[in-house]
Structure formats: C-alpha cells, structure tokens
Image (cartoon, rainbow, N blue to C red):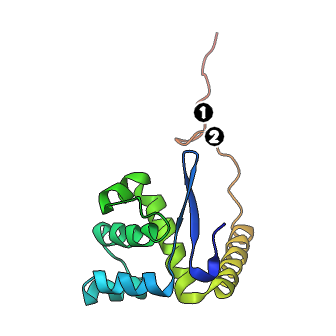
Amino acid sequence: MANPHKGEVEFKVDDRTYTVKFSANVMAEIDEALDPAEANKIMTMGRASARVMRKVFWIALRANHPEIKSEAEAGDLVGFAQLLQVTQRGLMLAVMGPEKLAALEAADAMKNEAAVASNPPAPDQGSATGPEPTARGAN
C-alpha cells in the first residue's frame, strides 16, 4: 500500500500495481538529474517538457521498481496523461504533504460542485446541429 507521507502514489498497468515514490531522497535525486531551470519548474509545479516529466517519473518509479532500467521502459508503461497524473500527484504530496493536499482537493471539489449548481445544463434542444426538421406537405 502506498505511503502518502513518503510521496507514494500507486497506479495499475494491466494486473500489476506500481508505486512511484517522491521521498526526500528521490526529490534530491530529481534535483541532481535536471538542470537548474528544469528542476525549478518541477519543484514549483511549472510546465515541464515531456522529456523532463518522463525522467522524473522514471526516477520516482525506480525507487520501488529497480527492474525498470530506463526512461523509455518507464514511459512505455503508461500513456502520457497517466504519467502526468501520477507524477503530479506524487510531487504535490512531496511538496504539500498529504493533509494539505487532501484539504486542497476537498476545496476544489466543493468549488466544482458550486460551479455545476450555479450553471445547470441547458434543456435538450435536439441534436447538436439544432432541432430536427419537420416534414412538410406529407400527403
């Protein structure tokens, strides 16, 4: 089971569960592996390139899965969207801690619920291209 206090996040690929880890040692290793500008983007949750995010994912993955021998092998495990989701969650756990992250997620959920409640969906207006045409002169 993943330990959120060590920045661990589990994800599944087929029938296997993997765990990335963003402990203090892993964060230092990420810092060492990247140039200062890239490391700063990662540590401040800025936008980073796909190459950098794959490297961060691999470093965090091999902490618990040393059998993953390369960045390419790590990148082949998941799609890019899942790689980003898992990596960003782990980074947020490492930087914020599980309690602050849970509070932030709860606040975001409440904000989303309020937005949906104040903007209900429009009544059905037929198809996406407009109402269905009616037949004329059907005699």
Which residue does the image show at 65% across and 45% down from the upper left?
125
Upstream in the sequence, badge 1 or badge 2? 2
Q: Is residue 23 above or below residue 49?
A: below
Coordinates of residue 134 in the picture (x, y in percent): 62, 27
Which of 41 and 113 lies nearest the eye of the viewer?
Answer: 41
Please give the label number shown on residue 132: 1
Quadrant housing the N terminus: bottom right
- Residue under label 2, please give it: 126
Answer yes or no: do the residues labelled 1 and 2 have beta carbons within 8 Å? yes
Residue type, mark 2 in image: Gly
Please give the label number shown on residue 74: none
Which of 139 and 124 lies nearest the eye of the viewer?
Answer: 124
Residue type, mark 1 in image: Glu
Q: Is residue 113 above or below residue 107?
A: above
Which of 85 and 78 lies nearest the eye of the viewer?
Answer: 78
Which residue does the image show at 46% across and 71% down from the upper left?
63
Asked where in the image residue 12 lies, by quadrant, the reply is bottom right
Q: In the image, 95: left or right of 62?
A: right
